[in-house]
Image (spheres, rainbow, N blue to C red):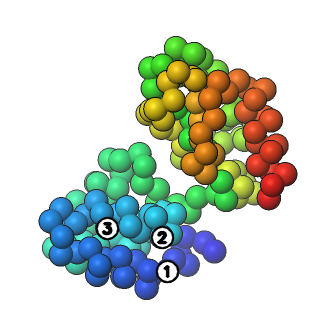
Amino acid sequence: MNQLDWDKNAVQAVIEGLKDIPGALLPILHGIQDRLGYIPPDSVPLIASALNLSRAEVHGVITFYHYFRETPPGKHTIHICRAESCQSMNSRGLEAHAKAKLGIDYHETTADGDFSLEPVYCLGNCACSPAMTIDGEVYGRVSPERFDEILNEVRAEA
């Protein structure tokens, strides 16, 4: 599936289900991302029309929040914590290792489509910094060596 092959019916269903609630834009964006894993850029006109907003307003909200993606994610999404506690425990080193190991930067997906890498600004796991998640599962005290082990475990489960 490429970025042009998105489920328009799923997007329409989310819009129809939420467009009448106050402040509907964020719930709609979350709903679409929850359903598809990202917000297709071609869905912006549909959202804007349903909410009587400009395309620029919808695009501005999507690009303001780091959480929202405009491209399909990989099979697994890795979030590395960049909050103060993790920074004090060398999350920058973990981040550099992860980027080098995967060959991608933040907001990118590996060429094989297996992993997407995203920053996050606190996982609430400060006592076990540095922390990261893979597909929502939290890992603490992650060293570069532990990162490699976790990655191998995830690959082995696939």
Q: CA separation, marks 2 and 1?
A: 9 Å
**Which of the two discs, 1 and 3, labels the residue nearer the N terminus?**
1
In front of the other: 3 or 67: 67
> Circle 3 is placed at which residue position?
28
In front of the other: 135 or 74: 135
Indicate which label's residue lies in the foreground, 2 or 1: 2
Type of residue at label 2? Arg
Compared with 55, 151 (above or below) is: above
Where the N terminus falls, by quadrant?
bottom right
Residue at left offset 36%, top offset 51%: 63
Q: Residues within 10 Å of mark 1 (few under 14, many from 20)?
A: few
Type of residue at label 3? Ile
Residue at left offset 45%, top offset 26%: 83
| Residue 62: image location, x then y, percent | 34, 56
**Residue 7 visible (yes or no):** yes
| Residue 126: image location, x then y, percent | 50, 24
> Circle 1 is placed at which residue position?
7
Badges 2 and 1: C-beta atoms under 8 Å apart? yes
Compared with 40, 103 (above or below) is: above
**Which of the two discs, 3 and 2, labels the residue nearer the N terminus?**
3
> Circle 2 is placed at which residue position?
35
Badges 1 and 3: C-beta atoms under 8 Å apart? no
Q: CA separation, marks 3 and 2?
A: 10 Å
User: Mark 2: which secondary structure?
Assistant: helix
Where the C terminus falls, by quadrant?
bottom right
Type of residue at label 1? Asp
| Residue 129: image location, x then y, percent | 57, 23
| Residue 86: image location, x then y, percent | 52, 22
In front of the other: 105 or 25: 25
